[in-house]
């Protein structure tokens, strides 16, 4: 028994914006980490002076932890959403579904905007889907 999912252009655009959030949160974490390590990078001792690196990280541990958890949980949330979305599609064959799933699991943050741009943006407003993922 097939069902239809209604996704207007507004909802697709919102999903497109949400697709960038895991990538933005990860880049924020990396940018903050590189900002903290800037003195070590300038002295060219980032990979040599492990004690200084550990000191910098321990001094900013709560912020680094929050940023990394934010990046992790936004990535996992979008990954689960997109995997369920792909599984429920009736218009995509199983080989293509598997390829997209492997691509998403491998390249988490970058794959969501790519999938949205190449697939979801072009989906019809009333999309036939399976009733569940089983």
Image: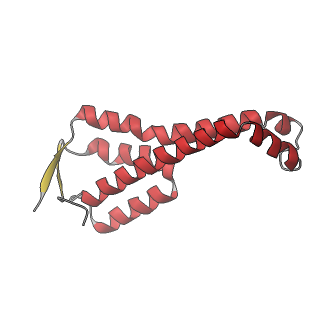
Q: Position of residue 31 (x, y in %)?
A: 66, 36
Dividing the picture into quarters, in which one does residue 13 lie?
A: top left
* Number of marks present in the image shown: 0
Answer with the quarter of the image where residue 69 lies. top right
Q: Is residue 3 left or right of residue 32?
A: left
* Relative horizontal placement of residue 67, taking residue 11 as reference (left or right): right
Q: Is residue 111 left or right of residue 63?
A: left
Residue at the spot x=39%, y=34% of the render? 17
Q: Quick one: which residue is furthest to the left in this view? A: 1
For the C terminus, the image quarter is: bottom left
Residue at image position (24%, 34%) is: 9
Quadrant in the picture for the N terminus:
bottom left
Q: Is residue 110 visible?
A: no
Residue drawn where x is 78% and y is 37% of the image? 37
Residue 26 in the image, given as x and y percentages of width and height: 57, 42
Q: How is the image coloured?
A: secondary structure
Residue 69 seen in the figure: yes
Of 53 and 45, nearer the camera is: 53
The picture places residue 130, in percent across and down from the top left corner, at 18, 59
Q: Position of residue 58 (x, y in %)?
A: 76, 42
Q: Is residue 103 above or below residue 112?
A: below
Please identify the quarter of the rendering in which residue 52 is found.
top right
Residue at x-position 82% and y-position 38%: 41
Height in image: 4 above or below 29? Answer: below
């Amino acid at each position: 028994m097939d069902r239809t999912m209604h996704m207007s252009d507004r909802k697709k655009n919102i999903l497109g914006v949400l697709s960038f959030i895991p990538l933005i949160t990860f880049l924020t974490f990396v940018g903050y980490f590189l900002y903290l390590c800037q003195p070590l990078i300038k002295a060219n001792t980032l990979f040599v002076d492990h004690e200084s690196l550990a000191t910098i990280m321990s001094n900013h541990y709560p912020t680094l932890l929050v940023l990394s958890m934010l990046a992790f949980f936004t990535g996992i949330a979008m990954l689960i959403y997109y995997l369920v979305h792909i599984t429920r599609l009736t218009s995509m064959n199983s080989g293509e579904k598997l390829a997209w799933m492997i691509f998403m699991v491998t390249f988490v943050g970058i794959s969501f905007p790519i999938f949205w741009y190449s697939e979801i943006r072009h989906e019809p407003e009333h999309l036939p889907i399976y009733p569940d993922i089983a």
